[in-house]
Amino acid sequence: MATIRLGKSDLHINPIGLGANAVGGHNLYPNLNEETGRDVVRTALDLGVNFLDTAFIYGPGRSEELIGEVLKEKGRAKAVLATKGAHKFVDGKVVMDNSPAFLQQSVEDSLRRLQTDYIDLFYIHFPDEQTPKAEAVGALQRLKEQGKIRAIGVSNFSIDQLKEANVNGYVDVLQSEYNLFARDAEKELLPYCEANGISFVPYFPLASGLLGGKYTKDTTFRDLRANNPRFQGEAFARNLDKVDRLRPIASQKNVEVAHVVLAWYLKQPAIDALIPGAKKPEQVKENLKTLDVQLTDAEVEEISSIFK
Ligand SMILES: NC(=O)c1ccc[n+]([C@@H]2O[C@H](COP(=O)([O-])OP(=O)(O)OC[C@H]3O[C@@H](n4cnc5c(N)ncnc54)[C@H](OP(=O)(O)O)[C@@H]3O)[C@@H](O)[C@H]2O)c1
């Protein structure tokens, strides 16, 4: 099984990880079956997919709890566990809090739900408006020194927030939306990460399934995607046409469109690892085929230009 080092951290992982927001993420997806969620995680660990990505807000808390249960079964050492915090409920409303006290409490709460005494990678899930970012990351650095977390991540930070957060060089990983349909990160975030030894983990790598190559113009959605303009009307049809243009490249390599898409991200210098989401164990197994795909520079350019 391929193993890479995640940026300048001490984490060594399979570059194909698992995005676990559909494991117990009842607030994101309707009618999730928890046993299927556990099976997704079991399958990942059995196949050597060790980089698991979760967050307090998936569930809320339930994704972490289910992963914790599976890790009790399979062994904590099998996983490189990433989770995130910052969401706080105040009078039934969600607000962001990056204060040192709240982050410290969030780490303690995640440790309990995950039934572990260390988190490999803890991210500030979203920036808040009030906490200086170096102060927030300083709190995570202290948790790292205490051995409660092993690496520091930030997520959904703008370039200015990232620079402020990384003023002492403490940030190991940035997680932001990035996929063939959403390429803003190429302007500033990816170059900054590359120059500063920060590993960039793209979320929505399959554009919530749109880049998976399985949808047709007749596919309908009953979750968050139903309200996403990318999945509606003519835009949806145009997007599917672009995905169709990947099929010859995939079939020539004897893989599926999803594998070509995922392999494309791994050609970016700042990207070491991916966390495609899976709702079924088969998808976890499927996504591992990405590791067999070699893209030439010409193919990387061709794919890029289809989605420009
Ligand atoms: N930091 C943040 O703010 C943030 C935000 C969002 C997500 N995330 C993280 O990023 C992870 C990935 O995002 P995501 O799961 O929302 O979206 P994604 O990875 O872009 O898409 C995942 C979806 O693609 C489909 N799929 C998976 N494997 C496939 C395959 N081999 N072929 C075809 N389709 C396939 C499945 O949907 P269907 O079965 O429905 O087709 C799956 O649920 C999340 O799980 C979460 O851990 C982080």
Image: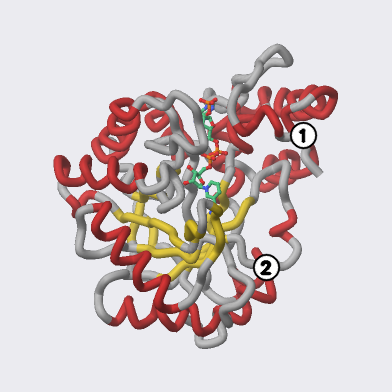
Q: Position of residue 287 (x, y in %)?
A: 45, 33
Residue at screen point 38% across, 36% down: 24
Kind of element beneath mark 1: helix
Q: From this view, report whether residue 36 is shown above or below residue 171.
A: above
State the quadrant of the C terminus: top right
Splitting the image into 4 quarters, where does residue 47 fall?
A: top left
Question: Looking at the image, can residue 292 be seen?
Answer: no
Q: Residue furthest top?
A: 218
Given the image, on which type of amino acid does mark 1 rest? Pro
Please give the name of the residue rendered at 82% of the width and 27% of the height, measured from the top-left corner.
238
Left or right: 238, with 154 as reference point: right
Q: Nearer the viewer, residue 118 or 108?
A: 108
Relative to residue 41, is residue 203 drawn left or right? right
Three-letter code for the amino acid on which mark 2 is drawn: Ser
**What residue is shown at x 53% (from left), y 23% (from top)?**
254
Residue 21 screen position, x and y as percent? 45, 41
Q: Residue furthest front?
A: 91
Q: Residue at x 74, y 24 (%)?
A: 240
Callout 1 environment at 10 Å: few (<14), some (14 to 19), or many (20+)? Answer: few
Q: Which residue is mark 2?
A: 158
Q: Is mark 1 within 8 Å of ligand 1?
A: no
* Front one among 46 and 305: 46
Dot 1 or dot 2, earlier in sequence: 2
Q: Position of residue 219 (x, y in %)?
A: 66, 16
Q: Is residue 196 visible?
A: yes
Q: Is residue 85 above or below residue 283?
A: below
Q: CA distance from mark 1 to mark 2?
A: 23 Å
- Tag 1–tag 2 contact (CB < 8 Å): no
Q: Return the mark for residue 229.
A: 1
